[in-house]
Amino acid sequence: MRLTILGAGPVGLASAALASARGHGVTLWSPRGGGTRGIRDAVLAEGQVSGRFPVLVAADLGRALADAEVVLLAVPGHAQGQVMRRIAAVVQGAPAILVAPATSLSPLLLDRLLVARGIRAPIGALATPPMTARRLGGDRVWVGALRRKLWLGAVPANATARLVPLVEALFGLPTEPLADALAAALADLMPLMHAAQALAPALGPAGQADPAALARLLAALTAERDALAAAFGHRLPDAERFMAEVGGLPQPEPERALAEAPHALSFLLALGRAARVAMPVAEATLTLLEVLGGRTLRGNAILAELDPRTLARQLQLGAAA
């Protein structure tokens, strides 16, 4: 397949290497331009995927999307809204679009932007990217643990059956279908893990993380998430299973925690208010992250454009509306 990857950070480069290794044609585009600096015609990968893998680099978004059969948006959740507006303005036809991770129902926002132009494309919501990765500089990337399994919902919900085999063909990873894009957004525990890790040092002696305290905080956040999912009629992969499939707790990244965790927590709290599900631990966690960051971290630009009270209908209709 002809795959265009939007985002040239660690996940974008690692996904390019993995897809190229499987024989797909890959084009890379960087929203800021700097991500592809130093990449000419190949990505050099180390780790779980190793070798030199050919890619094309596009400086212009329109050219990057021109012949794509599949598009993968691989940028952090808090930055997706702005990139989606750029995508919706120039995309032609109806390529399959994958969003990894599908944070805060961003696929639903992209669907709205496309429908406004008369475009109805299937949009896949991946709960997590296909792997962990670290950029080594230039054209080099380290590919960490490949996920043992991926989870996928879609907008519209009935597009899942088409997109699951496509994802498996691209990355060679078993992919479990979820009910819809909301289930995919709620299934991702990585932001909650980052939030728990950011607070864990304050819970242990001498600034050292207390593993038991970290586990208790993550369990409490997960319990609130599960209650919220149940209010929307969803049953999600349990935390133990999710962590086993994604390779366990990620490495602590304080900066990432302060960027992504508040975005996800704001999303959960907004849904909680709409569904009348109390989420005191999520509320307290977000408040403590604001104290650590020294600034207000509330708000979610994507969710601000969606109505949590009518999500069920929006998700079912999706591009079919």
Image (tube, rainbow, N blue to C red):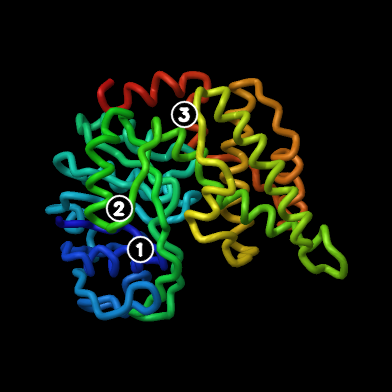
Instruction: Measure how far apart labels 2 and 1 are at the Cα level.
Output: 8 Å
Closer to the camera in the image, 37 or 175: 175
- The kind of residue tagged 1 is Gly
**Is residue 109 something one can see in this rendering?**
no
Query: Residue 207: x, y in percent?
Result: 82, 68
> Which part of the image, by quadrant, shows the N terminus?
bottom left
Q: Which badge, 3 or 2, comes first in the chain's sequence? A: 2
Residue at 26 percent across and 41 percent down: it is 163
Instruction: Measure how far apart labels 3 and 2 are at the Cα level.
Output: 22 Å
- The kind of residue tagged 2 is Leu
**Is residue 212 something one can see in this rendering?**
yes
Residue at 63 percent across and 65 percent down: it is 252
| Structural crowding at the residue carrying mark 3, measured as other residues with C-alpha within 10 Å and reported as few (<14), some (14–19) or many (≥20) | some
Closer to the camera in the image, 219 or 75: 219
Residue at 65 percent across and 21 percent down: it is 276
Query: Residue 85: x, y in percent?
Result: 34, 43
- The kind of residue tagged 3 is Leu
Secondary structure type for disc 3: loop
Q: Which mark is residue 114?
A: none
Residue at 38 percent across and 33 percent down: it is 108
Q: Is residue 11 above or below residue 266?
A: below
User: Do the numbered discs 2 and 1 sit on residues whose CB atoms are within 8 Å?
Assistant: yes
Instruction: Measure how far apart labels 3 and 1 are at the Cα level.
Output: 27 Å
List the residue tagged with mark 1: 12
List the residue tagged with mark 3: 306
> Which part of the image, by quadrant, shows the C terminus?
top left
Secondary structure type for disc 2: strand
Q: Is residue 29 above or below residue 158?
A: below
Query: Residue 74: x, y in percent?
Result: 37, 56
List the residue tagged with mark 2: 72
Closer to the camera in the image, 47 or 116: 47
Secondary structure type for disc 1: helix
